[in-house]
Amino acid sequence: MIQTGYADGNKIRLLHNGSEYFTALEQAIDTAELEIHFETYIFKNDLIGHKIAAALIRAAKRGVSVYLLIDGFGSYMLPDSFIQRMLDANVKVLVYRREVLFFKLRRYRLRRMHRKLVVIDACIAFVGGINIIDDFEQLRDEQIPRFDYAVLIEGPLLKKIYAATQRLWLIVAWAHFKKRWANNIKLQPTGEHKGNQFAGFLIRDNIRHRHDIEQAYLEAIHNAQNEIIIANAYFLPGIYFCNALNKAARRGVNVILLLQGRVEYRLQHYATHALYGNLLDAGIKIYEYSKGYLHAKVAVIDRYWVTVGSSNIDPFSLMLAREANVVIQDKILANQLRASLKQAIINESTLVARTGWQSKSWLYHATNWLSYYVIYYAQSILGYGQKKTNHNSNA
């Protein structure tokens, strides 16, 4: 067990999809008294974006210090006028690596801020995979919500989460020559116990915490005895991660993957399919979510170990982006998440049959492998995946 960043005595609530998350988030913002730290990859100029921005503006106008950090690529379509309205209301807004015209393929440009974190009054935090974007997509003749999760956290884990948001805000503020914004941080979480859940806060960056999230996954998979359920929007793990899943399945663990059924990014979609044959041969069950778009980044192992966060299991999340996940060891929350995933698997997904997969045309399989090697080659020319860790040469 990676113990750094773990704490006992937490109270953690699972939030399903944007409908639960945005309601809880807006309510929390409206009760803020002193300070809000807010990080998101996408902040969109739509109904949800306007609603959350309005809540942040209300908070700032009543004297709350509001710090909003958005990613320059994920939120590149957010109009300057939208940001200016928040700045005019005294919401402090910073852009992490603002995109520029004539983008060049360089590793430092691909290092994005993919975290979705909110900390309010250093007392409650939201961590998950949900961006500030309208939850619904128009599919067929109906509105279908994105399938995703977040958690609401109270308790001693706030010390770790708050410190992480402070640290990143200070780094970006100094980089933007906003020293006066960097020095106006004054709160400290109390560390008071709010519940009985043992949980850890794990980040991925390019300095001290390059492999923490992936190693937590690998340790939990290695220790699994009965069942592994992973739901991941963009699933393209390295060889060590695949081998860990295959070994678990071959020693009798029921391994279930819930993956994206709809084509969102073609290259990634087909590259993921290149891995199916090896996984199916090991006895792993693969389901493709077909009701809407899968955006979840969660796992449940042995009905006890849970992770919820922003990190996909792909090169972008595991090697390039700033990510944040929570790991929870709790039977009640694990069973809640497991029940939600099982419902989606049974009622809203399609099983990938091993025999049917093998019978697909050679051209289809060739396309999958070509896509896989294109991504692999892009990864290699960017200089990643060359140094091995204890677990994974691609982390």
Image (cartoon, grey):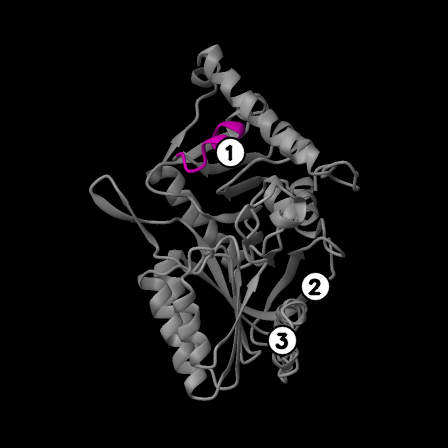
Residue 375, above or below 146? above
Q: What residue is rendered at 43% in x and 65% in y? A: 80
Q: Nearer the viewer, residue 298 or 194?
A: 298
* Disc number for residue 156: none
Question: Which label's residue is closer to the chain start, 3 or 1?
Answer: 3
Q: Is residue 244 visible?
A: no
Circles 2, 1 touching at the beta carbon (< 8 Å): no
Q: Label 1 sits on what residue type? A: Gln
Q: Label 3 sits on what residue type? A: Lys
Q: Position of residue 127 (x, y in %)?
A: 53, 62
What is the magenta segment's predominant secondary structure? helix
Alpha-carbon span between mark 2 and mark 3: 29 Å
SS label for mark 2:
loop
Disc 3: which residue: 178
Residue 35, above or below 261? below
* Disc number for residue 268: 1
Magenta extent: 263-271
Q: Nearer the viewer, residue 141 or 258?
A: 141
In the rendered structure, the answer to whether residue 188 lies left or right of residue 152 reads right
Q: Position of residue 347 (x, y in %)?
A: 33, 39
Question: Circle 2: is it few (<14), some (14-19), or many (20+) Cα within 10 Å?
Answer: some
Q: Is residue 311 visible?
A: yes
